Amino acid sequence: MKKIVLFITILFVLSTTTNAQWYQIGENPAGVFSIVKFADENIGWGCRNDPMKIFKTIDGGSTWSVNFEPWAPITSIFFLDANHGWFSHVSGNLLYTSNGGESWTVRYPATYWHMEDIVFSDTLNGITCGVGFAGGEIYKTTNGGTFWELVYTPSVSVYALSFINDSIGWCVGDSLYKTTDAGQNWTLLSSNVDGTILKMQFLNESVGWLSTFGGNNLYSTSDGGNSWNLKLTSINDFWFTDMNNGWYNTNGKIFYTTNNGISWEEQYSDMSNNLYSLYFMNPEFGWAVKSNGKVLHTINGGTPVELTYFTSSITDKNLTLKWQTATETNNQGFEIQRPKDSKTEKVEVLPRYNIGFVIGKGTTTEPQSYSFVDENLSAGKYQYRLKQIDFDGTFEYSNTIEVEINSPTKFSLEQNYPNPFNPSTSIQYAISSRQFVTLKVYDVLGKEVITLANEEKPGGMYNVQFTMNNLSSGIYFYQLKAGDYFETKKMILMK
């Protein structure tokens, strides 16, 4: 039989209408993390200050275990890699590990008050800042923290550090300071920021972001911190991975920018739970902590399951849908939907029903290909769409594609397959217009064995499957009559 194959290709992406791009992977067994940081895609750290515990994960945040119980609240976490890390303390000391938390060493930059933030450029050179009796204190080490030198005492408290390289950095709190010589000397910058600065992140020597306590305002600068512009209010946390891509959370929502904060789009929403600590290790891998102790995760920057193409092909009466995803997050699978009745010109208004389900690949950054076959269709127009469903029940729809199956242009009767057969085979035939059709099987003596069709049918292609259990081996004939057309073919039953 000559097969006619029709290809129709439509390119589109899934519409972003739900929170499919972020998914829950685990929770802090002791409550809500106040800080969460990751050394790589799998190894991360979180701290809980009531009760005071340090947790570690080795599976990207799916499970957490207690690693250390400090005697004072943790204020910041900094890891150079999976082994070398630092925690700053409110007791005026620092905790250091060189073996991924198997053991911890206490280092003492100050003998009183508390340290707020810490950064290292390598295993030897680091800066830490905090609050002293008379204001702020900034310390520097060149031997991995064995000895700390008090290099600057700002007149106000300082809470956060940000360095863009080994030499240039900023320290902020109730005022803002800058260094260009690896923290040895600091210069006070004039600032129009309203409130105490709790977090700061510079992306290069000119562009930076900070958030304040109280109003939880988000500011940006384009002149190295000399002047600041108020961008947002009432945020909880923020993070930028480069000049364009950034995130912030507020209440139960996460927002995302691709143009350095000129505009923001909502990525996630759960108004029943607030969101706190937010961290990205690169533009793809990010984590956020919910008020119910759950941890949210994304491996593609918060983008949803993304279709790169959606195609259909028709072979005889079977229609094959094929689609490919560029990336997936928490993808349970795809429900294939089409109207139950296509015998109308307004198929787009008909209710849809589920004709099948294809299992997804869960979470992956690799392209994935899928297919589904809708079999034995009559001539007519058909509309299809995909309902992509996450493991948490959220979903989103693809665009709809329309495919038309045309009636055959002539009558035909195909050879049965398989032939010889035992005991089942199928016969395919085509009629080009509505006709009364009979399809019968005869033995070699011309005696009718079975009637397979005896009714009026619209133009189209048909496939009849049947079983001949009660007949003996031998030669049989099958005959199609449709209007003025009739044809007979031979088949062999071999037991």
Image (cartoon, grey):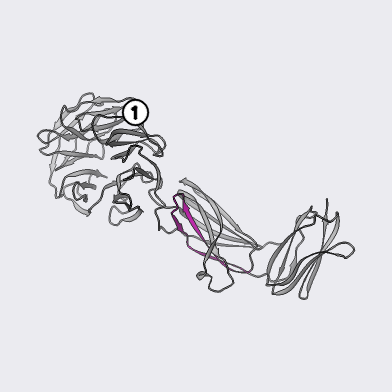
Magenta-span inclusion, residue 310: no
Magenta-span inclusion, residue 384: yes
Residue positioned most to the right: 445
Per the image, label 1 sits on a secondary structure element best described as: loop
Q: Which amino acid type is shown beneath numbered disc 1?
A: Gly
Quadrant of the drawing holding the N terminus: bottom right
Task: Decide if residue 150 is on the left or right side of residue 399.
Answer: left
Residue at x 18%, y 31% (from the top left corner): 139
Q: Which residue is mark 1?
A: 101
Question: Residue 42: image x %, image y %?
Answer: 40, 37
Segment colored magenta: 379-405
Tell me which secondary structure the magenta stretch mostly adopts: strand
Q: Is residue 33 visible?
A: yes
Q: Nearer the viewer, residue 277 or 53?
A: 53
Q: Quadrant of residue 410?
A: bottom right
Give the answer, above or below, for where 304 lies relative to 201. Answer: below
Q: Nearer the viewer, residue 15 or 202?
A: 15
Question: Residue 334: image x %, image y %?
Answer: 51, 54
Give the answer, above or below, for where 96 lies relative to 165. Answer: above
Question: Residue 290: image x %, image y %?
Answer: 33, 46
Q: Quadrant of residue 480?
A: bottom right
